[in-house]
Each structure stands twice: as C-alpha cells, then as structure tokens.
C-alpha cells in the first residue's frame, strides 16, 4: 500500500500542526533516525515525532539535555527564511514557528 493512498497526497491537520512545532534541527534528526531504521513504510505522525525528539546514542551517553528552542534561535531561523524582523517582534517561540511554517508551506495554521 502506498503512503499517498493511505494518508492522502497532502499533509493532514495533525501533520501540519505537529511539524510546525518542531525545529528544523529536530526534523533533520528525525529523518536521519528513520533513514537508519528498518521501518518498511513511512511513519504516522506520532512515530515521526518520537524519532524527531529522540536523543542520539552519543547524546544519551553524555547525558546532554535535549536542545531547547528559544525565541532567539527561532528568530534566527525565521530571519534565514526572509521573514522581516519587525514581523517577529513581541512573538513567542510557538508564534515564530507558525510564521516559519507559513513561509515554508504557504499554509497559515488555523486555516487548515
């Protein structure tokens, strides 16, 4: 069974809202984890999120805390997408992530 037949050709609300709450680094980590797994089909969103938020073996050995999203780190990311600084002033982390998501996908959260 193909992923598109099972889940549709466009992301559903769960995927859209969930991915918006992940940082680019977390998404890259999750894709790396899944690429190295023996999973036969693409994951559902809860499995994808677990992979994104999992710690690498090296981090676990060093007992490093999971990376923390800060307003400053999300602002840097938003600026790299060309979002004007004045559009970000006064926003919290989740609001900045929503702006980034909108810029990347053209979809405004809450309108899906």
Image (cartoon, helix red, strand yellow):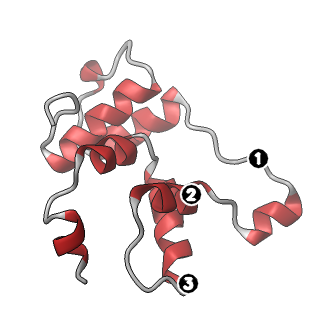
Q: Which residue is mark 3?
A: 36
For residue 109, above or below residue 105 = above
Check disc 1 and report its element: helix, strand or loop: loop
Lower sequence index among marks 1 and 2: 2
The part of the image, by quadrant, that contains residue 109 is top left
Q: Residue at x 46, y 70 (%)?
A: 31
Check disc 2 and report its element: helix, strand or loop: helix
For residue 73, above or below residue 86 = below
Q: Is there a contact, CB below 8 Å, between mark 3 and mark 1?
A: no
What numbered label is drawn on residue 50?
2
Q: Residue at x 23, y 70 (%)?
A: 6
Mark 2 is surrounded, within 10 Å at the Cα level, by few (under 14), some (14 to 19) or many (20 or more) other residues, namely few
Check disc 3 and report its element: helix, strand or loop: loop
- Residue 17 x %, y %: 32, 40
Q: Which residue is mark 1?
A: 65
Q: Is there a contact, CB below 8 Å, between mark 2 and mark 3?
A: no
Along the viewing direction, whichever of 51 and 8 lies nearer the viewer? 8
- Residue 77 x %, y %: 39, 43
- Between circles 1 and 2, the one closer to the viewer is 2
CA gap, disc 1 and disc 2: 16 Å
Q: How many marks?
A: 3
For residue 43, above or below residue 104 = below
CA gap, disc 3 and disc 1: 23 Å
């Amino acid at each position: 069974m193909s992923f598109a037949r099972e889940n549709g050709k466009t992301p559903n609300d769960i995927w859209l809202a969930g991915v918006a709450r992940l940082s680019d680094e977390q998404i890259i980590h999750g894709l790396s984890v899944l690429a190295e797994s023996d999973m036969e089909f693409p994951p559902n969103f809860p499995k994808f999120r677990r992979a994104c938020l999992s710690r690498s073996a090296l981090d676990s050995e060093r007992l490093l805390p999971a990376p923390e999203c800060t307003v400053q780190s999300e602002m840097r990311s938003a600026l790299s997408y060309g979002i004007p600084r004045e559009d970000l002033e006064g926003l919290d982390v989740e609001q900045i992530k929503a702006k980034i998501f909108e810029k990347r996908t053209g979809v405004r959260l809450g309108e899906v």
